[in-house]
Image: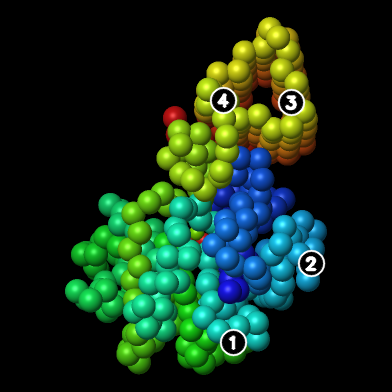
Amino acid sequence: MKALLLAGGLGTRLRPLTDDLPKPMVPIMGRPLLERIILNLKKSGINEVVISTYYKSQYIEDYFKPEEDYLGVKIHYITEESPLGTGGAIKNAEKFFDDTFLILNSDIVSDIDYADLIKYHNRRRAQVTIASIEVRDTSQYGVIEFDEKGFITAFKEKPKPGESNSKYINAGVYVFEPEVLKEIPENTVVSVERETYPKLLEKEYRMAIYKFNGYWIDIGTIDKYKKVHEDILKGKSRFVSTTSSRGIILGDNVKIHPTAKVIGPAYIGNNTEIDAYATVGPYTVIGNNCRIGQESKVSQSVLWDNVKVRRFARLENAVVTSECIVEVNMEVKNTVFTANRLASTTLTT
Ligand code: GDD
Ligand code: MG
C-alpha cells in the first residue's frame, strides 16, 4: 500500500527551528521525523510513499533521493510552486493513487497502528477513515462529531469555544478511497479540514472515526518538540525503538571520558565525544558528531548534529540546532540556541 505524506507547511510556530529546514525534517532522537515516520510505515507494510512538499522542498529531496528506495521504501515527490493547502496537496498527488491509501500529516509523533487502522477502514467499508484521539483542549485541532455506529457526522476545524462538545480530534492520519478525490477541485488552494471533509459529509460519503488511545503528539511548537523527547526517554511512546542500558542510549563510536558523568535517561548519537568532568543528562538528547567540552554541563536539553559545547558551558532546558558552537563559560537556559545566537524564544520548564 502507498502513503501520502503532507510535508509542505511553513512550520511557523516552530521557528527558529524551522528557519533552515522544513518542519518534517527536525530531528527526533537524532534522526529526521520524516525518516522515523517512513521507517514506522514500512513496519506496517507500506512500501511506497509520496512526499508532498513546498517549504524548503530541496532539503527533503537532498535527504531522500527522488525515485529511489530508502531502506526498502520507494520515494516519490510532488512539489507545489505555491502552497495548495492540505486538500489541494492531496488532489495534486491524485495520479499516484488508484487504490485505498494512507495520508499523514508529517508533524505527528504517534504509536498509531497503521495496519489496524486500514483493517478497520475496510471492515467499516468507509470511503474516508480519520484516526482520532481524545483531548481536553480541542481548540488547536480539528474536532470530530460522530454517531453511535462510529460514522462521522460533523468535522469542525479549530472550533471556537462552545462550537462543539466533542473531545475527539483529528489525529492527522487518514485512510482514503481514491474516488473521494473527485470532490476536490484541481489546482486550487483547498483545506481538506475546512472544505473537503464538510463537503463529503454533506454529500453523505461514508466517513468513519478510528479511535486511538495510545501516544500521540504533534510537534507544532518548541515546547511540544522538547516534550516529545522527554516522553520518548520516559518510555511513554514506542515511536523510536531503542535499546538502552540504565536509560542511556548510545550510538556507534561514542567516546565518554572516564571522569565524565552521563545521567539517564539520555541519548547520545554516533561519534559524539564527552570530555573530562563533563556532566550530561538527565533528559538529554545529543545528536551525531557533537563534542561536549571539559567540565561543561548539559541537562534537559536537545542538541542536534555537529554541536560543540566548549569548556565550562552550561545548558539547561535548551534546544541547540546543528553546527552551533556554545562558547566557553556560556549559559543557555530555557531557550533555543541557533546560528550561534541565543533566540528570543522562552521554553517552559
Ligand atoms: N504540501 C502541502 N501544502 N502540505 C501542507 C500545506 C500545503 O499548502 N499546508 C500544510 N501542509 C502540511 C504540513 O506540513 C503538515 O504536515 C500538515 O499539512 C498539517 O498542517 P499543519 O499546519 O501542521 O496543521 P495544524 O497542525 O494546524 O492542524 C492539522 O493537524 C492537526 C493535528 O495535529 C489539522 O489537520 C487538524 O485538523 C489536526 O487536528
Ligand atoms: Mg500541525
| Amino acid under disc 3 | Val
Disc 4 to disc 3, C-alpha distance: 14 Å
| Amino acid under disc 1 | Asp
Query: Which residue appears at 54% of the width and 90% of the height?
Result: 185
Q: Residues within 10 Å of mark 3 (few under 14, many from 20)?
A: some
Disc 1 to disc 3, C-alpha distance: 47 Å
Q: Which numbered dot is residue 330?
A: none
| Amino acid under disc 4 | Ser
Q: Residues within 10 Å of mark 1 (few under 14, many from 20)?
A: few
Q: Secondary structure at mark 4?
A: loop
Mark 2 and ligand 1: say if the CB distance to the nearest ligand atom is below 8 Å.
no
Dot 4 and dot 2 residues touching (CB under 8 Å)? no
Q: How many marks?
A: 4
Query: Which residue appears at 48% of the width and 65% of the height?
Result: 115
Q: Which numbered dot is residue 245?
A: 4
Q: Label 1, on which residue? A: 98
| Amino acid under disc 2 | Glu
Query: Which residue appears at 60% of the width and 44% of the height?
Result: 28
Closer to the chain start, of discs 1 and 3, is 1
